[in-house]
Amino acid sequence: MYDNIAFGLKLKKVPEDEIEKRVRRVLKLVAMSDYEDRDVDTLSGGQQQRIAIARAIVNQPKVLLLDEPLAALDLKMRKDMQTELKEMHKKLGITFIYVTHDQEEALTLSDTIVVLNEGRIQQIGTPVDIYNEPVNSFVADFIGESNILNGTMIRDRRVAFMGHEFDCVDEGFGENVSVDVVVRPEDIYFTTEESKTQFTAKVKSCTFKGVHYEMFVDTDTGNELMIQDYDAYPVDSTVRLYIDPDDIQVMKKERTCNTLYGTVKDEETVSLLGADFPLKSGFEAGTEVRVEVPFEAVDLLDNLDDGVLDGEVHFILYKGDHYHLTIKTDAGDFLWVDTNDIWDKGDLVGIRFIADKGIKISRKDG
């Protein structure tokens, strides 16, 4: 194992006495001083991860890239290694760039988090900022558990969702504007006081999670919410609930419909996304058009042959009473769909548009 760690230094032709000094220092740093004569194959998964980190830091990098370094470990070992990595970071005083799909790991280890989707930065901030003030529904869903719901900003500091109006702290959205609303499961509170009650719900399930109970409830307007609380409430019981204004996060919607551009092929057809859709446009053949397709006007089909276009379920967002799906077409374009049907990520689907569900067609330059 000593030679494994020293390999990079030997390639750089570092003097032997300096190699020995550095190797012993990093072995101590990763708490593996008693293992230098062991073969790497005899070590546990966690010990092998420590040796891999030692092999990297022995070269004294200014920046250390850690790409999913704990992915292969079991939960307890991963937690232990997270603590050790934080200690190493303090002792080394160098920049760690830590790549992970584990949201809890990102919140635990980071000073600054960069959330990426499809290679594009969605948000940069501290763990507290990212968790408490997500900029869009992707970030809210990716970092921690969330209830993400469609809402309407009535005016500054007043928002409607789940069929009720709530005070909030957000401003500057305008009046009667469609928004996304995020409420974390731990920020929905139970009460026995009628004066505090903002809405009621029926408990569907209650699961003990060690530190808290996780409950799913159906609200009095038919939305499903996840709630985390230290107290358990019986299944089928009716409960009174409220949300403090500070705990409601309002976000601008990234889009309100699918906006597409295509060309009128004939009186009955518009060419879009590399396919011909049966749509009556009212324009002459060859006219370039803008087509606005509501999320609910996109129909997904099990049988690919029944669709005009093929696609794959790319991302799934549950919004309390329906699913909001991101579909990636074969041509690499994206469509967004509202549906009550249950799909899995990676499902292949046929795609067609439902013409009588509010599709608007206008001149591209109009």
Image: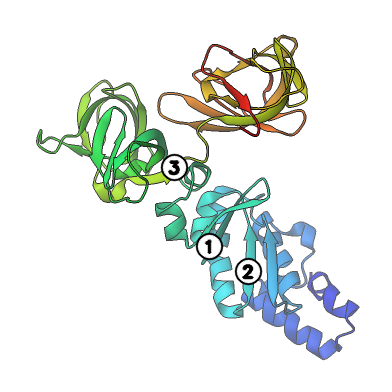
Whole-percent x, y for residue 43 in the image: 72, 59
Q: Residue visible at 60% across and 25% down?
A: 362
Q: Residue beneath label 3, please?
A: 145
Secondary structure of the residue carrying numbered label 1: helix
Quadrant of residue 23 in the image?
Answer: bottom right
Which of disc 2 and disc 1 is earlier in sequence? Answer: 2
Q: CA distance from mark 2 to mark 3?
A: 26 Å
Which of disc 3 and disc 2 is earlier in sequence? Answer: 2
* Amino acid, disc 3: Glu
Work out which quarter of the rendered image holds the N terminus and state it: bottom right
* Local crowd size for mark 2, using a 10 Å CA cut-off: few (<14), some (14–19), many (≥20): some
Instruction: State whether residue 53 is above or below residue 146.
Output: below
Q: CA distance from mark 1 to mark 2?
A: 10 Å
* Local crowd size for mark 1, using a 10 Å CA cut-off: few (<14), some (14–19), many (≥20): some
Quadrant of residue 238 in the image?
Answer: top left
* Amino acid, disc 1: Leu
Q: Residue beneath label 1, please?
A: 109
Q: Residue beneath label 2, please?
A: 96
Whole-percent x, y for residue 225 in the image: 35, 31
Q: Are marks 1 and 2 in contact (CB under 8 Å)?
A: yes
The foreground one among 320 and 79 is 320
Q: Residue visible at 26% across and 23% down?
A: 220
Quadrant of residue 85 in the image?
Answer: bottom right
Instruction: State whether residue 45 is above or below residue 205.
Output: below
Whole-percent x, y for residue 164 in the image: 25, 31
